[in-house]
Image: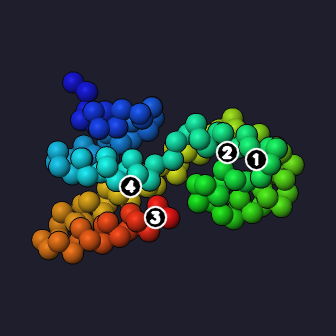
Amino acid sequence: MPHIVTHYLPELDEPERSFIEHLTAGMSHENIQQFAAAYRQVRKDPQTLRLLAIIGIVAIPGLHRFWVGQVGIGFLYLVTWGLLLFGTATDIIKYRELAFGYNRQLATRIANNLIQSRKAPSSAGEVSFSQDLRFQSQ
C-alpha cells in the first residue's frame, strides 16, 4: 500500500519521497495534510534549480545558489564567474542533490513545527507555525 504522502505530494521522486514518508510516518492524517500543504509552498523544484544553474553559465552565475538560500556561495560564484564555470558545471550535474538538501532542511523544520504545535494545547503554536512558514518563503 502506498504511503499517504504519495497521494498528497505525487511530484516527489526518490530519495525525497522516501525521506518524506519516513519523516511523516508517525503523523496523523490531518498533520500529513498540513505538512503537504506547507511543504508544497516552500519546496524547490530540482528542474528549476538546474535551469537556473544553466542560466548562470551565460548570465548570472550563482543565481541557483541564491535561490536555495546559499547567499555566501552565491556571491562567491557571482564574483568568480561560477568558480570559473567549474562550480556551476558541477552544480548542473548535481542539481538533484542541491535541491534535495534544501528541501530536506525545510521538511524537517516543517515537521518539527507540526510536532511542537501538536504538543501545545493553545492555538498560539499554529500562529507561530504559519508565521514561520511565511518568513521562510520570503
The label number, if any, that marks residue 56 in the structure image: 1
Spatial CA distance of label 2 from label 1 is 6 Å
Q: Secondary structure at mark 4?
A: helix
Q: Disc 2 marks which residue?
A: 52
Number of marks: 4
Looking at the rendered structure, the kind of residue marked 4 is Thr
Q: Which residue is mark 3?
A: 136
- Judged from the image, the secondary structure of the residue bearing numbered disc 2 is helix
What residue type is disc 1 on?
Gly
Q: Residues within 10 Å of mark 1 (few under 14, many from 20)?
A: many
Q: Earlier in the sequence, mark 3 or mark 1?
A: 1
- Counting residues from the start of the chain, the first of labels 1 and 4 encountered is 1
- Image point (21%, 51%), residue name: 31
Residue underneath mark 4: 108
Q: CA distance from mark 3 to mark 4?
A: 13 Å
The residue located at (31%, 55%) in the rendering is 111
| Residue 66, quarter of the rendered image | bottom right
- Residue located 44% across and 38% down the image: 16
